[in-house]
């Protein structure tokens, strides 16, 4: 059997190597447009930032080394320009000579990946304008920044790649401005209130972030000097285009292959709509593991898993790919962000009866030297009590919190399945009741009605209007609020009326919950706890006790 | 209703506080022997090491503060000396005056915790001999070490507490010797080969570890000067007794309460064999979540979860405690160790058809600056393919690996449930295929017969005798072994016979697997891969090609 694989980064090389191990008698050929194969695409921003010193470290394997290790044949510098699925033939073009040749196959794997999306604006090809897709891109960017002693850079796009680029340029001492067309950073990745927290944090860390802004023109004559946007002009000596990526599937347009917005639709065996044609990685559209609906998940991790499953399928093993959770994690200066599953917005759109909670906790024993915090948002289905998604922010191991959720969601866990989980605890690692479990408890309390609370999103939307703010911090801190000393509450509280609408606020939410519990016992009927408390919300009280 | 809770550290204070929140009308009283309540028992070693500066940080709540926060009444300096369950009465003794009083209850909670086990040897009460159970212990130890400029210390016991004590004394610049009666460190926590790795690592880090050694006498007249053991005498100016703990349940001996080795047996509602008497925390014996058999799990984390469930039960809510997995994690100098579920030995004893694998992997993208390794041992049931346990060593986030396993085991996950898990990946956090998933793949390969391997334990036991060692590292490294260049293998290998017994060894196991895969294709019938390779095993080849 002759298997042709177009594309040699993550999905392509994984499929090929695994397939040869499954059956060495299969002739497997990988075709790549570039000279590099199997490079560490996800590491590129860190090469730019200098965390990775040498370019060699980004190259997992040279074509020669890879062939030796796997038995796969590799042809570099060849681009697929046409496919005739009926004839089982791909037309390949040599990128240097321009010569074309026909290549026949028994099975075809399309793993052509994706490229940086090109905004249709002037100046996008000026020197100093970069993308972040290949080792060459990263090397040019780093060299350009160093040779030109770049002081100011603009990054267009506040997704994972844009923010990683921003972090790494910032780490080089460059003043970075990030702009995004969306009204928030990390759109579709975090819910708006979590994204706002990230944005504030980035700004505090010295990275300027302007959302809801479109780039109109890239300025400069012989090289980039700035960018004109809907919010004014930003001078810069360097610009990174990270406004999304587009699958490299143009050569398939005439084939009739089923696609959606340029991605190739595959079934659970990674098969496309064309006979004997498969796809994996950034160019393929898989499904969401929770909803079963289509989801594009152009991540290095998914590409590897998809490639592995595909190799097994091609070798005749009964395997299916269950789809993705849209997991992601990003390191930012002093604050990491991780997520998996459905956002609140996605969960509502999918028709769930959604409940959420936002819970700040310690990330390890509070007395341990580098203890810090997690801000955890959980999204669950009220009807089944299934966990649907999680978003976590914090300076530490947010990936741990995400991985717990991934395993839970994979297994269809309801909140009760986390309730007495014997997670790892010692002071340098975690808290006696695990932060994940703490967040689950708060959500369970909310679902069970033992906690009545308002989310930060509801608060920001003005839902607290008409509520009197009660400050239950250890010492009064909220200007204009009614202070209550929790320790002294053993009955009615002088100055608060039992039918009054009361918003209880503390530092993180715990004391407020304690006070609410007690006030309800003593007959207060309309108390609401502000989730995330002052730790997450910017709590302001005006003269009339209305929340602005 | 009057609820009396004896004990005020983790389980006692948790039960009391949660119970008051469930129903503030319940009269809840906590009785403690010490003056401190709710202290951070797990933090004590780090106070000794100076990672936690002030003693105040160890005290989560003073009795006053705790009462104010919860509404629980606290009586300190009172010890329970007798229980009359028929009369529903506890006799309390004032630790200062010695006076006793009778205290009646409707429901009784025993949360008396555990104390350091006392070895029946001479000298155990000499100045300079310490236990690690209370803030007073930790404070005395730190002060003693500083005032006496202690240079040498001996720790008796190589369990979690003993090793944490050793790490922290070591961090203060003290030369530490750890001795344990068991033939390994972390007995019942890690399997022997994993424990041996930890021991070697501790020794490289400058902590002397002597296992299989019993202390015979503690030497000294006015203060400790050394310890005489079965392996000779070790001079020291300070000695820490960490040879296990014993539940504080002596006062129950005449009550007829069902106990096992001093622990109080409880059912899934934390109820003892006596009417209206419950127990939680270090003094209680719960069950193992996998086997359903009795298990003692004296950990701060379990104590909190048990206390929480118990409070709900006492408040009339239908809740059960599902038991523990025996999870634990410990920070050691430059190497952390974590575990959950059954060890290989425990799994065999429980009657499972056990298969294990040991897999070294990167812990994050190999090119990322602080990338290091995980050594993961998985234990699974061959019949059901259920994951039964995991043990992980590494300088980084071993807790993350453990927590994934905890969630999987809780949900009854089989290996296939981890296969395409969309775990969090970005280069600063993990690898494109998650280290946990990599380990699962190797175990699946082994179970499916696509990998034939030998565990480090089997290798250490001499199972490789008669095998010819093949070195498939990138460059020849194993003295006396037959070197094979993996990239050049495209058929028979000159010098190796197809029926020969061959042990294939590389750095971590991956290249060896690749070579085996290829050799089997070319007709080699008796190849075995050494798990953990040279990374974990001390591979030696003698002249006759037999492994010593």
Image (cartoon, coloured by chain):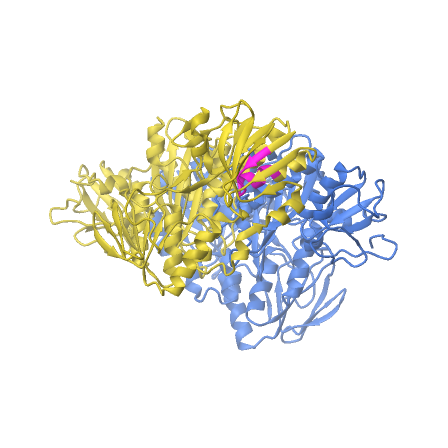
Chain colours: A yellow, B blue
> Image point 65% across, 54% down: which residue?
B186
Q: Is residue B413 visible?
A: no
Side of B321 relative to A126 (left or right)? right
Between A119 and A172, the one nearer to me in the picture: A119
Quadrant hosting residue A71? top right
User: Taking B216 as reference, is A517 above or below it?
Assistant: above
Q: Position of residue B462 (x, y in %)?
A: 81, 50
Quadrant hosting residue A26? top right
Q: Position of residue A370 (x, y in %)?
A: 44, 60
Q: Tally the marks.
A: 0
Between B149 and B9, the one nearer to me in the picture: B149
In the rendered image, the quadrant that contains the C terminus of chain B is bottom right
User: Taking B199 as reference, is A257 above or below it?
Assistant: above
Q: Position of residue B75 (x, y in %)?
A: 42, 53
Side of A164 relative to B397 (left or right)? left
Magenta highlight on residue A14: yes
> Image point 68% across, 41% down: which residue?
B356
Magenta highlight on residue B48: no
In the rendered image, the quadrant that contains the N terminus of chain B is top left
Most extreme residue toward the right is B544
Q: Which residues are magenta?
A: A4-16
Most extreme residue toward the left is A544
Between A372 and B538, the one nearer to me in the picture: B538
Q: Is residue B225 visible?
A: yes
> Image point 48% across, 65% down: which residue?
B51
User: Taking B43 as reference, is A294 above or below it?
Assistant: above
User: Taking B128 as reference, is A90 above or below it?
Assistant: above
Q: Position of residue B329 (x, y in %)?
A: 56, 51
């Amino acid at each position: 059997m002759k298997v042709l694989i177009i594309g040699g980064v993550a999905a392509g090389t994984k499929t090929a190597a695994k397939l040869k191990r499954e059956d060495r008698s299969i002739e497997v050929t990988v075709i790549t447009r570039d000279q590099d194969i199997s490079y560490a695409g996800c590491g590129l921003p860190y090469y730019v930032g200098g965390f990775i010193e040498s370019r060699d470290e980004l190259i997992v394997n040279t074509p020669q080394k890879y062939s030796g290790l796997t038995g796969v044949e590799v042809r570099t510098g060849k681009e697929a320009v046409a496919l005739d699925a009926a004839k089982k033939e791909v037309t390949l073009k040599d990128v240097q000579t321009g010569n074309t040749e026909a290549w026949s196959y028994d099975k075809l794997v399309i793993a052509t990946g994706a490229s940086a999306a090109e905004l249709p604006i002037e100046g996008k090809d000026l020197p100093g304008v970069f993308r972040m897709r290949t080792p060459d891109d990263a090397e040019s960017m780093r060299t350009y920044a160093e040779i030109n002693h770049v002081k100011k850079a603009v990054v267009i796009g506040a997704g994972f790649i844009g923010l990683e680029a921003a972090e790494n340029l910032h780490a080089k001492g460059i003043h970075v401005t990030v702009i995004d067309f969306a009204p928030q950073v990390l759109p579709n990745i975090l819910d708006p209130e979590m994204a706002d927290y990230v944005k504030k944090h980035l700004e505090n860390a010295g990275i300027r972030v302007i959302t809801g802004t479109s780039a109109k023109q890239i300025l400069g004559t012989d090289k980039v000097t700035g960018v004109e946007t809907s919010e004014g002009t930003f001078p810069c000596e360097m610009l990174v285009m990270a406004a999304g990526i587009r699958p490299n599937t143009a050569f398939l347009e005439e084939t009739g292959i089923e696609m959606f917005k340029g991605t190739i639709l595959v079934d659970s065996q990674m098969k496309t709509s064309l006979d004997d044609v498969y796809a994996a990685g950034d160019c393929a559209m898989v499904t969401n593991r929770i909803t079963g609906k289509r989801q594009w998940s152009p991540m290095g991790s998914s590409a590897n898993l998809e490639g592995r499953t595909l190799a097994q399928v091609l070798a005749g093993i009964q395997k299916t790919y269950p789809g993705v959770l849209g997991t992601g994690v990003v390191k930012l200066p002093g604050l990491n962000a991780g997520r998996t599953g459905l956002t609140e917005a996605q969960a509502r759109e999918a028709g769930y009866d959604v409940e959420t909670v936002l819970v700040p906790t310690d990330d390890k024993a509070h007395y341990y030297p580098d203890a810090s915090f997690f801000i955890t948002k959980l999204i669950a289905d009220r009807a089944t009590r299934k966990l649907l998604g999680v978003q976590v922010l914090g300076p530490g191991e947010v990936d741990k919190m995400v991985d717990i959720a991934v395993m839970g969601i994979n297994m269809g866990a309801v909140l009760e399945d986390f309730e007495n989980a014997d997670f790892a605890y010692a002071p340098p690692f975690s808290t006696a009741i695990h932060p994940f479990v703490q967040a689950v408890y708060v959500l369970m309390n909310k679902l069970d009605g033992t906690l009545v609370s308002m989310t930060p999103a509801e608060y920001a939307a003005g839902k607290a209007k008409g509520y009197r703010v009660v400050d239950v911090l250890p010492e009064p801190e909220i200007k204009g609020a009614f202070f209550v000393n929790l320790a002294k509450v053993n009955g009615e509280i002088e100055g608060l009326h039992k039918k009054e609408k009361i918003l209880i606020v503390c530092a993180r939410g715990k004391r407020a919950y304690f006070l609410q519990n007690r006030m309800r016992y003593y007959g207060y009927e309309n108390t609401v706890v502000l989730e995330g408390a002052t730790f997450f919300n910017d709590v302001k009280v005006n003269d009339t006790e209305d929340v602005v």
